[in-house]
Every structure is written in C-alpha cells, then in structure tokens.
Amino acid sequence: MHLDLNALYNLRGKTVIVTGAAQGMGEAMARAFAGAGAKVMLADISGDQAASVARDIGGDAVAMATDMASEASIVALVKATRQQFGQIDILVNNAGVQHRRMLEDTDLAYWDQTLDINLRGVMLAMREAVAVMRADGTKGAIVNIASNSAFHPMAPSLMAYAASKAGVVSLTRSAAMEVAPDGIRVNAVCPGNTTTPGQGTASGPGFPPEVIAKFMPPLGRAGRPEEIAAAVLFLASDAASYITGQTLIADGGHLIG
Ligand SMILES: NC(=O)c1ccc[n+]([C@@H]2O[C@H](COP(=O)([O-])OP(=O)(O)OC[C@H]3O[C@@H](n4cnc5c(N)ncnc54)[C@H](O)[C@@H]3O)[C@@H](O)[C@H]2O)c1
C-alpha cells in the first residue's frame, strides 16, 4: 500500500485550538499547524502577545485571551472557536505553569493554582471540545502536553508540577477510552528539558548547578520548541490515525539516561 506522506500531514481545512500559544512550545505548535494548512486559535492568558503571534502567522490565525484556571474562560474559548471556524478538529492543551516550592512551603493557594491550570484546565477544555466534536460528528484529535517529570522527579521543588503532569497522563488515557467510540483520539506528549522563555532553560531560577547538570539528557542538549511541535503535529495528524491513549516522551532520552 502506498503511503502519501503529504496527505497524512496535510491539515488544510482543519481547525485547531492551541492553549498557551503566546510563546515557547505553544507558539511553535501554532506556527507548525498553520504551516500544515490549519486554521489556528491561539489561546493564552497573555492575549496581546498571542494576538501579536497570530498577526505574524497571518492567514486564518486568530487569538483569544483565555485563562485556563477559569471554567468560564475555557467555555468561552471553545464557543468562540466554533463560531469563528465552524468546527473544532484539534485541541492542544499546552498551557502550563511551573512554579517551584518545597513541600514545607506548599500552601493551598500555590497547590490549587498549579493544579487548576495544569490539570483541571485540561479536563475542562477536553470536556468542552469533545461536546462540540460530538455534536458536529467531528472525528477529532486531542493532544495534551504533560512532562517527563510525570514519571520521574526531575528536581526538588517540583512536586505540585509533577503531580499535575502525572494527572494529565492519566486524564489522557481515561478520556481516550471514553471518546474512542466517537472516533476521537486523545494522546499526550511529555517534553523534557526544552528551551523556552518560561521554562526548561538551564538558567531557570532556583536550581543549583548540580541539579541543572542533571537536566541534560543523553542526546546532550536541551530540546527546541519546534521538536516538541513536530511530535504534537504527528499525533494530531492522520499519520497517527490508529494511535490513542498514548504518551509520547520527547526528552532527548532523559528517562533512559
Ligand atoms: N520547557 C520545558 O522544559 C518543559 C518541559 C516539560 C513540559 N513542559 C510543558 O510544556 C508546556 C509549554 O511550556 P513552555 O516551556 O513553552 O512554557 P512557557 O512558560 O514558555 O509558555 C507557557 C504559555 O502558557 C501561558 N499560560 C500560563 N498560564 C496560563 C493560563 N492560566 N491560561 C492560559 N495560558 C497560560 C503563558 O502565558 C505562556 O504563553 C507547559 O505545559 C509546560 O509545563 C515544558
């Protein structure tokens, strides 16, 4: 059988929501989806920054200020995307925060903020997007961004973050099972140390040099946002049409190192 690679990765006519798209990996994903022909909604708490990226992408890219900690904001995002584009084919839950605190300093406000954005927001966005996909009969794809720290503690002070990302892996598998009968696929990508404005840079605050040295994976360098975007594009595309409930670890081999 002949595999038409261009057709497998062609997203012309598809519509995509990328959360946390104002910078870093989310921006790279938005640019990658637009490059594959998709119409992209860039959602971010920094609405102005997302709008500036959308303008730079041009074409059908639009932006919306969205707070992934707010149910009302997520409901509004999905509604506005459907109004703008007519349907939702792909959702990428990329927005996330990585604030660092040791266990003894972990108060409820800090814990809830991390879990609300990184985990509860993923559930809410999936709930809203799946409702639209089902109503429209869209055999959509969802990609959730977790982290390799879901599987292994990368450093002290990342307990809430790691727990939230382990939750994302679990949510991904449960949701995949529930929506498979509708032809909707749900997968996760777990990046490792990736150079972005917000996270993953070797100069990240609060880590002593010996911890930063441990961030270097067997491939010997940090990842680039585009390399994570490529993994997301694969899972969202028809190239992954028989893959659901899976977690693709893109960490330069860190977890095997
Ligand atoms: N960079 C890394 O090394 C690394 C490693 C593993 C996992 N991740 C995960 O990848 C994703 C992207 O990370 P990044 O490094 O590009 O981060 P980043 O901080 O550079 O970008 C994150 C984006 O999310 C937005 N955001 C933050 N809070 C939000 C909210 N409440 N609602 C909507 N948007 C919000 C920010 O404004 C920003 O544009 C995150 O989920 C992160 O946890 C990153």
Image (spheres, grey):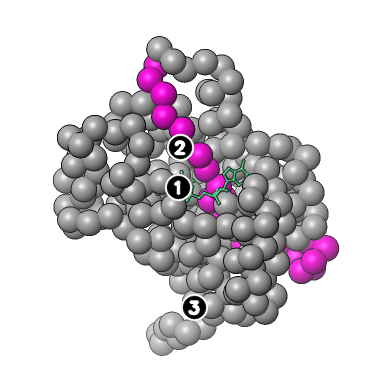
Counting residues from the start of the chain, the first of labels 2 and 1 encountered is 2
Q: From the viewer's perspective, is the residue at label 2 or at label 1 nearer?
A: 1
Write the residue at 49% across / 78% down.
Answer: 8
Quadrant holding the C terminus: top left
Q: CA distance from mark 2 to mark 1?
A: 8 Å
Magenta run includes residue 29: no
Write the residue at 64% across / 50% down.
Answer: 46
Q: From the viewer's perspective, is the residue at label 3 or at label 2 nearer?
A: 2
On residue 8, the disc is 3
Which three-letter amino acid code belongs to the residue tagged 3?
A: Leu
Residue 180 seen in this snapshot: no
* Left or right placement of residue 70 versus residue 223 in this view: right
- Residue 38, how many percent across, how many down? 62, 74
Write the residue at 55% across / 47% down.
Answer: 95
Q: Is the residue indicated by label 3 positioned so its CB lies within 8 Å of ligand 1?
A: no
Q: Secondary structure at mark 2?
A: loop
Residue nearer the viewer, 50 or 85: 50
Q: Which residues are magenta?
A: 82-103
Quadrant holding the N terminus: bottom left
Proximity of marks 3 and 1: CB atoms separated by less than 8 Å: no
Residue nearer the viewer, 183 or 240: 240
Q: Is the residue indicated by label 2 positioned so its CB lies within 8 Å of ligand 1?
A: yes
Residue at which label 1 appears: 198
- Residue 186, how many percent across, how many down? 54, 52
* Left or right placement of residue 100 versus residue 152 in this view: right
Proximity of marks 2 and 1: CB atoms separated by less than 8 Å: yes
* 199 vs 89: above or below: above
* Left or right placement of residue 134 versus residue 119 in this view: right
* Left or right placement of residue 127 versus residue 96 in this view: right
Counting residues from the start of the chain, the first of labels 3 and 1 encountered is 3
Residue at which label 2 appears: 98
